[in-house]
Image (spheres, rainbow, N blue to C red):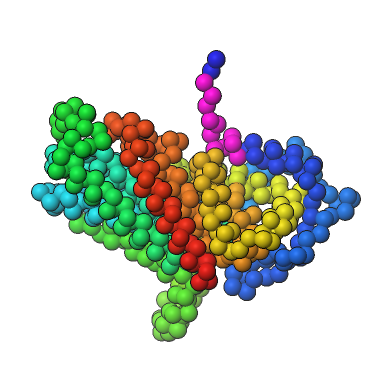
Amino acid sequence: MKKFKMPTAYTLLFLIIVVIAALTWVIPGGKYDTKVDKATETEIPVSGTYQQLPSADQTPQGLWEVLNAPINGFFDAKDIALFVLVIGGFLGVVMKTGAIDAGVTRVIRKLKGREQWLIPILMTLFAIGGSTYGMAEETIAFYPILIPVLIAAGYDAMTAVTIIAIGAGVGCLGSTVNPFATGIASGFAGVSIGDGMLLRLIILVVTLIISILFVMRYAKKVKDDPSKSIIANMKEDNEKHFLNQKNEDIEFTGKRKAVLTVFGLTFVIMILGVIPWAYKFNITIFEDLVNALGKIPFIGKLLGGMIPLGDWWFGELTMLFLTASIIIAFIYKMGEEDFTSTFINGARDLLGVAIIIGISRGITVVMDAGGMTATVLHWGEGMLDNIGSVMFTNLSYLFYLPLSFLVPSTSGLATLSMPIMAPLADFAGVGRDIMITAYQSASGIVNLITPTSAVIMGALAIARIPYSTYLKHVWKLVLVLSIVVMVLMSVATIMA
C-alpha cells in the first residue's frame, strides 16, 4: 500500500476550484448593494443589503468555467503576478552579485571571538530580510557558514539553526512590506500596503526581541555547560563533521557594498511609495521639484508623468524593482547577456508563485460568477451579530493557523482568502489592514514549525537535527509569539 502524499499547492487549489464550482449548484447565488469606500477607493458590500437572486438568474458553474478559472484568475491578477516575476528577477540579480552573502560573512568575520553578539545582530539582519522581501530560501546558504563558526565558539548546531530560521521567520511574521505576503494580501483586500504598517512594525520589534532573548538564553546555557544542549549526544560527531568543513570566504568588495546600498534604498523607496501619509507629506516638495526641473524642457518632459511617493501601487513598484535591477547590473558590470539571463532565471524561480496566484484567484472568479461570494459573506455577516471586533480579530488569526497548514503558499493563501475575509472585516468593524496582519502573522507562525516547509526541513537536514528535536525546542517560543501577536492585534483593534 502506497503511503499517502500531500498534493502540491497547484493541485490542491485546483481541487478547491472543482469543489467550489460543485457548491454553486447547491448554494444559492446572491448579491449585495455596494458603495465606494472613500479611504481605499474600492467597492465594498453594504451590510444588511443581501438579496438572494431569483432562480432564473442563478449561474451555477460547470466544467467549462472550471477549466477557464485559472486562466481568468491569472488575467484578473496580472498586475500582481507581473510584480512577483519582476521581484524574482531583481532578487536573482542581487543574489548573483553575492552582496548579501558577503555582507553576512563580513559580520561573522568581524565578530570572531565575540560570537555572542552574532545572535542579536544576525537575527536582526535576517528579520529585516524576512520583513522586507520574504527572505526564506536565501537563508539556506548561511547554514554551512554559521554552524561551524558557532560550534567552534562553544555553541551547538541548534543555536545556528534558530538564529537563521527564527530570525528570518519572525521577519516574515512581522512583514512590513513583504511583497509575497503583505503586498499580495493588500492588493486583494483593496488597501495600500502601507496601511497597518505601524502595527506590523511593532509586532516585528516585539517578537524579534522575545526571539533574540530566547536564542541567547539557550546559547549561554550551552556555552556554560555543553551537556545542557538539546543535541548534546551529537556534540563529538558534529565537531568532527562541521569543523573539518572549509567555507569560502566571500570578499566584501566596493561593488558589493554599492549593490547592498541600492538594494536597501529600493526597499526604502518602496516603503515611502506606498505609505499614504508619505503622499501628504512630500507632495508639495515633490511638485516643487518637478516644477523646478520642468523649466528644463527635456528633463521636464521626462519627469512630467511621475506619480508622487505615497500614491504608488503595483505598476510603480514593478517599475521600481526593474529599474533597481538594471542599476545593480551596471554597478556590478554585468554584461547584457549575463544580466538578462540572470533576471529571467530569477523570474523563473518565482513563476510557480505567479501561477499559484492565478489558480487561487480562479477560486474567487468561480465564486463571484456563481453568486456564491455574496451568500458566503451573508452567512458570515449573520455569525458576526453576537461577537465583537476583538473576538473577530482573534478568531480570524486562529482560523488562519490551520488554513496555513493546508495552503502553505503565503501568496496562494492571500489570494484565496482575502476576497472573503476583507469584506467580513468590514462587517465586524475591523480594519482590513488588521485582517492582513492576522493572515500574515498566522502564516509566519506556522512557517516556523511546519514540516511542509522546504526551508525548515532543508535547514535541519544541513544541521543534522531531527525535526522532532527542533519542534521540542521551539514550541514554547511559538506559543508565546502567538499570544503576543493576538494581544497586540486586540489592542490595535480597540484603538482603531
**Along the horizontal axis of the image, is 462 left or right of 65?**
left
Who is closer to the viewer here, 367 or 313?
Answer: 367
Residue 11's spot in the image, x, y percent?
59, 34
Who is closer to the viewer here, 440 or 221?
Answer: 221
Q: Quadrant of residue 383?
A: bottom right
Residue 125's spot in the image, x, y percent?
29, 55
**Along the horizontal axis of the image, is 250 left or right of 123?**
left
Q: Quadrant of residue 349?
A: top left
**Along the horizontal axis of the image, is 391 left or right of 105?**
right
Is 371 within the magenta?
Answer: no
- Residue displayed at 64% across by 71% down: 37
Q: Residue furthest right?
A: 56
Question: Magenta segment range?
Answer: 3-13
- Residue displayed at 48% across by 48% down: 443
Residue 48's spot in the image, x, y percent?
75, 65
For the question of whether residue 119 can be seen, the reply is: yes
Split into 4 quadrants, where in the image is the N terminus?
top right
Examine the rendered structure and indicate whether residue 151 appears above or below residue 389: above
Examine the rendered structure and indicate whether residue 190 appears above or below residue 224: below
Q: Residue furthest top?
A: 1
For the question of whether residue 192 can be seen, the reply is: no
Residue 346's spot in the image, x, y percent?
41, 45
Q: Residue furthest front?
A: 386
- Residue displayed at 41% across by 36% down: 454
